Image (tube, helix red, strand yellow):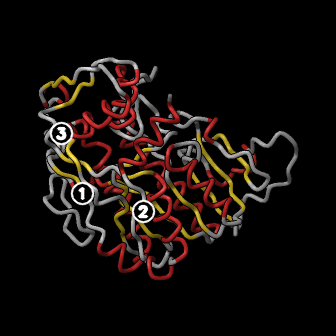
Amino acid sequence: MKVLVTGAAGLIGSHLCDKLLEIGCEVVGVDNLSYGNVDNLPNHENFNFIKKSCTEDFSRLSNDCMCEVSCGCDLSGFHYVFHLASYKKTYPKVGFENKVTSSDVMVNNSKMIKQVSDFCKQDGSRLIFTSTSDVYGSHKTFNEEDSVSITKTDVERQSYSLVKLFEEQVLLNLYNQDELNVSIARIFGCFSERSNKKWSGGHIPLFIDKAQNNEDIVIHGDGKQTRSMAYVGDIVDGLISMMDNFDVCNGDIFNLGTEEEMSVLEHANLIKEYTNSSSEIKFIGEQEAHGNYKDIRKRKPDLIKSLNVLDYMPKYSFRKSLERVIGKWK
């Protein structure tokens, strides 16, 4: 089976490529390496890499193949396309030279979904799109059947969730018009040893990095806000299950994550314990950290639908996964 993965050098994308190769797929990865790390890419005879932005013309993929020799890659006829690539807002303080603005996020993600969906329609590929739990906004429940409406559209940090929700609607409209076969995964927080310590994976890799260097661990708000942070293996298993069960997933949305929930302060204390760190835990107010954006107090996925349709059941313990990542980062 032939599979295309965008965002292949990123946290989820690289692990997904590994899994696809493990089960015998031929995989082509696409990434412009603005967030991803080339070291995350598989070294495998059935893997080819294309350095390319997904905002560019996907009909010319073959011109961008990065194989060291003329490989004769047939960059068409993909059974599945996993679209994980995305633009996220960045700030100078998190270690990126070029700041990505809210407008960049909205415009570039919109361009990408146009290019990728057009490619899938032309190629006859089935598309699995990764959205985000951020689309739920401040909902008290996180169920796929809930009506989703994000308020405060003037808040900069909402740009990513807004454009992801827009992309979902574009794809579902194409499905309803019989133009595209597509399934959508709403991804909740995850991490792994490939998390970028300055960015991807949320607060977990950042806290580990600070703890291992005995620097202050800074929590935004009071630390009582709860998060469900999955090891990336559980996310990848869910995506593979969506591919394996695509006929029943087509035109539908599924949450992927873990129901194991802890407060951010509990995460910080656990990381201090596992790293034997002398770091101090400090707090800054939400206004200072986020401006007008009010942080979500709780984020835990409802996995009933994913369990019933995909037989999806997270298997990685947060504590064991945390120990594993800390051990690999020593």
Task: Determine the residue positioned at 40% across, 26% down.
Answer: 209
Q: Answer above or below: position of 249 versus 224.
A: below
Residue flagged by tag 2: what amino acid is it?
Lys
Q: Secondary structure at mark 2?
A: loop
What is the distance, in whole Å, between disc 1 and disc 3 at their CAs?
26 Å
Q: Position of residue 52 (x, y in %)?
A: 62, 41
Residue flagged by tag 1: what amino acid is it?
Lys
Residue flagged by tag 3: what amino acid is it?
Asp
Task: Identify residue for label 1.
Answer: 300
Task: Determine the residue positioned at 42% across, 22% down.
Answer: 95
Nearer mark to the viewer, of 2 and 3:
2
Q: Secondary structure at mark 3?
A: loop
Q: Secondary structure at mark 1?
A: loop
Task: Determine the residue positioned at 58% across, 62% down.
Answer: 81
Task: Identify residue for label 3.
Answer: 154
Which quadrant of the structure image shows residue 43? top right
Q: Answer above or below: position of 277 versus 17.
A: above
What is the distance, in whole Å, between disc 2 and disc 1 at their CAs?
16 Å
Q: Nearer the viewer, residue 328 or 120?
A: 328
Which of the two labelled residues, at mark 2 and mark 1, occupies the earlier sequence position?
1
Q: Residues within 10 Å of mark 3 (few under 14, many from 20)?
A: few
Task: Identify residue for label 2.
Answer: 315
Nearer mark to the viewer, of 2 and 1:
2
Which quadrant of the structure image shows residue 79? bottom right
In the rendered structure, find residue 114 and report the number of the disc placed on it: none
Nearer mark to the viewer, of 1 and 3:
1
Q: Residues within 10 Å of mark 1 (few under 14, many from 20)?
A: many
Q: Nearer the viewer, residue 64 or 301?
A: 301
Q: Residues within 10 Å of mark 2 (few under 14, many from 20)?
A: few
Which of the two labelled residues, at mark 1 and mark 3, occupies the earlier sequence position?
3
Q: Nearer the viewer, residue 327 or 18?
A: 327
Task: Determine the residue positioned at 88% across, 46% down.
Answer: 70
